[in-house]
Image (cartoon, helix red, strand yellow):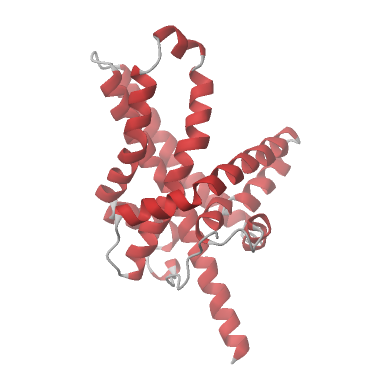
Amino acid sequence: MIPTMTNLPVIRPSNGGGVLGQTFSLFIKNALALLLITAITIVPVQLISNYGFPFEFKLLSYSIRDVIISIIFLTLLIPVVVHYLIERLRGGKASVAQAYRWGLSKWLRMIMYDFLQNVILTAGLLLFVIPGLFMYVRLLLLPIVVAIENTSVTNPLETSRNMAKGQFWGFIGYSIVINGFTILVTWVTGELFISLDFINGISVTLFYLFINWISLLGIILTLVLYLKIKSEQNSAAAQQNN
């Protein structure tokens, strides 16, 4: 049975710095725990990647390995981070171990829907920019839906699409800010890294650890958006019932 989260925390970001303020606040308040979560997933993978293959093989298959690592391993970070942060938002004592147990229970579904999302987005981009943007907005919350809900009884594609209704420009604007910030930090860090004289397996691992840690901002953004929309939907439903 695919597990689902209940009693989700109610958040209203507009009253506390907005969606972006809530996103950065969650990241900063949980920075060390998020770094630990990232390290548990990224460090073993990078060490195997850096030391487990001949240099020539790494050069020839670099892009292939990156895609495999992204699809198989980095998707695990999404449900783990989501579970940990939701427990924190509930006011409970969040556990990294429990977060990973939740993530592992969702891992296969995350891989399946991540692959499907990439296929749909690629097809949308091939149909020119505008269809690609509409596909991007409709699927933006898909990973969060899969990480939280029971996808054996609900259609996460439909849920993500319905939650995106009326959110086109908001989703685009938030994504530009967070992705722009992440790209800027990645570029600056990359330039500093290249300028160093001690590039080896360990330093490369630390570089990717930092980059993937900063990239968690994208996951946190979509989580905040999901919880915000859910809170609004539940509030509207309660008012109708009354």
Kindly identify the residue that appears in the image at 73 percent across and 33 percent down.
126
The answer to which of 64 and 211 lies nearer the viewer is 64
Outermost residue to the top: 56
Q: Quadrant of residue 203?
A: top left
Which quadrant is the C terminus positioned in? bottom right
Q: Quadrant of residue 38?
A: top left
Outermost residue to the bottom: 242
Outermost residue to the right: 127
Q: Position of residue 197 (x, y in %)?
A: 24, 13
Q: Position of residue 181 (x, y in %)?
A: 41, 41
Q: Quadrant of residue 54?
A: top left
Kindly identify the residue that appears in the image at 32 percent across and 32 percent down.
43
Q: Position of residue 19 (x, y in %)?
A: 45, 60
Task: Please say if 175 is above or below 69.
Answer: below
Kindly identify the residue that appears in the image at 41 percent across and 71 percent down.
15
Which quadrant is the N terminus positioned in? bottom right
The answer to which of 175 and 43 lies nearer the viewer is 43
Kindly identify the residue that appears in the image at 67 percent across and 37 percent down.
119
